Amino acid sequence: MRIPALLATAVVLHFATRALPQATTMDPTTQFDFWVGTWDLAWDGGKGTNTITKELNGHVVHEHFHDPTAKYSGESWSVWDAPTKQWKQTWVDTDGNYMAFEGGVVGDRMELSMRMPDKETGKLYLWRMVFFNITPNSMDWEWKRSADDGKTWEVKWAIRYVRKA
């Protein structure tokens, strides 16, 4: 099963220089600003691009992921949900996947998670995506799953992001 990179046009200049600020010292609706921009992606066995924009008066973070080798694409929409004080993200892709995540800033990382059965085995897992090592021009992203409710994690996909000039 291909899993979303979650990750994706024009960048307002101040977004291009932001790393992940501390969650306690900022407007929570700007916590995903580190991701806004156009990125070159690399992972074991592949390369792609991800373009992330802020839309709808800056309230929605829209991702456009593309893996040209596998002819795979996906999009996500992320919003800050004030009543729950969490980010909510919806992912859809060319494989017909639909995923709904929630989460937020944990220390110096952005973490979003959900529960979903594995497509091949049907076994229910806790899935988590983590953005970390965040700098203005690069970051790492991992797609993980846990069979024991988050006690241990298995990395299923690791992606290196480098901002396009």
Image (tube, rainbow, N blue to C red):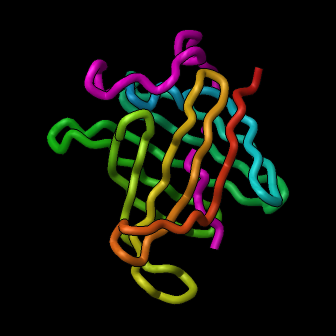
Q: Residue at x 33, y 48 (%)?
A: 103
Position of 41 relative to 17 (above/below): below
Q: Position of residue 17 (x, y in %)?
A: 58, 14
Depth check: give the residue in front, 89 or 57: 89
Q: Residue at x 42, y 53 (%)?
A: 90
Start-end of magenta stretch: 1-29
Q: Residue at x 51, y 38 (%)?
A: 62
Depth check: give the residue in front, 151 or 134: 151
Q: Position of residue 76 (x, y in %)?
A: 50, 48
Q: Is residue 29 left or right of residue 47?
A: left
Q: Is residue 57 left or right of residue 70?
A: left
- Where the C terminus falls, by quadrant? top right
Extreme residue toward the top, this view: 13
Position of 110 relative to 100 (above/below): above
Say if the magenta span includes residue 45. no
Q: Is residue 43 left or right of residue 50?
A: right
Q: Position of residue 45 (x, y in %)?
A: 82, 60
- Where the N terminus falls, by quadrant? bottom right
Q: Could you say which quadrant of the image residue 86 lies in? A: top left
Q: Majority secondary structure of the magenta segment?
A: loop
